[in-house]
Image (cartoon, grey):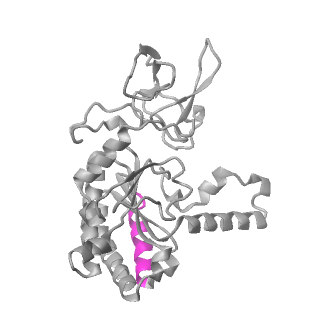
Amino acid sequence: MVETLTMVFSLRFSSLSLPPHNTITLYTLPHVPNHRLRSTSNVSPPSSTLLIKHSLCPCAAPTQQQHLLVPEEEEEEEELKCINEAPSLENDSLPPGLRRECMPRHVAVIMDGNRRWARLRDLPVGSGYEAGVKSLKTLIELCCKWGIRVLTVFAFSTDNWFRPKVEVEFLMSLFEGGVKDGMGSSLRENIRISVIGDISKLPKSLEELIINVEESTKNNSQFQLIVAVSYSGRYDLVQACQRIAMKVKDGIIELNDVNESLIEQDLETNCTDFPYPDLLIRTSGELRISNFMLWQLAYTELFFAQSLWPDFGEADFLEALQSFQRRWRRYGE
């Protein structure tokens, strides 16, 4: 059995906003059975899980699903924050300046600026959306290549239904074509596709296609693409509250049972193991979140890019990730 190895390093960082103390304790532990975990995750830690009392990486603060109870003989038990897997030393697939252990697991994007991009070029609005699809494909490829687990894109909001009918119909057709084209590659590349939003408002053919692609890719695990269509953050909260109210009405739960955890379980992002984006990117220079994932973005780092969405490429994404990795995520502490 692997012995517990404790290493204490006294480090000083002039460039990072670390806590007042400067001692970092690393614990290498043997495999811990599931029953000893507080985590809500179903994934057991690897045989040599790295536990970090104060992370070397400012952006690597763990989520609430990553807490372990570590027994201590000489002091009271304390809750330590950890990273599920030990940081990989292999950064060959990453561009210079990015650190594997500090990569976000879930990135969300508000793809803004398609229409402005087209108008600046005296092109039809539809050309802007078509160019935006190319940017999305590029971003998906980069996420897969760089080890990001989940990408959520805000494709069509509930407010977008009020746009001109011709534009809405074009977008519905574009969505349908994109889903058809992407289904084969998703199956080959082990990509799971999920859609959040009120799909009952979509054309029937598109709704059926979405249900089919979600079912066909539900067991894929390499990467997850979540597409928000006919979605808004307020809608998400309302539908979650309606579901909970129905459970109370039917006697399944008591009113006093309603808490944050229960709400989280009924949000549309319950389709993923990583429901909370680590990083939100909005393109086109607009400085707002536009009713997107209002609950889930509580502790998300925000990055606002000046590029219009069709112009957003690898250099822009790299800038956003580098900005993210320079930040210290405190989660309100």
Specify the principal SS of the magenta part. Answer: helix
Say how many tags the image has. Answer: 0
Q: Residue at x 28, y 47 (%)?
A: 319
Residue 127 occupies quadrant: bottom left
Residue farthest to the bottom? Answer: 166
- Residue 76: give x, y in percent of width and height: 65, 18
Q: Residue at x 24, y 63 (%)?
A: 311
Q: Position of residue 74 (x, y in %)?
A: 61, 11
Toward the viewer: 230 or 286?
Answer: 286
Instruction: Give residue 139's quadrant in the image.
Output: bottom left
Residue 25 percent coordinates (x, y): 47, 19
Q: Residue at x 47, y 60 (%)?
A: 289
* Range shown magenta: 205-219
Above or below: residue 48 compared with residue 142: above
Is 92 inside the magenta-drawn segment? Answer: no
Vertical relation: 88 (above or below) 222:
above
Q: Judge whether residue 250 can be spotted in this image.
A: no
Quadrant of the drawing holding the N terminus: top left
* The quarter of the displayed image where residue 233 is located: bottom right
Left or right of 69? Residue 88 is left
Q: Is residue 81 left or right of residue 250?
A: left
In-front residue for pair 224/155: 155
Q: Is residue 61 something one can see in this rendering?
A: yes
Residue 206 within the magenta-colored segment of the rendering:
yes
**Residue 226 on image: x %, y %:** 42, 61
Quadrant, the C terminus:
top right
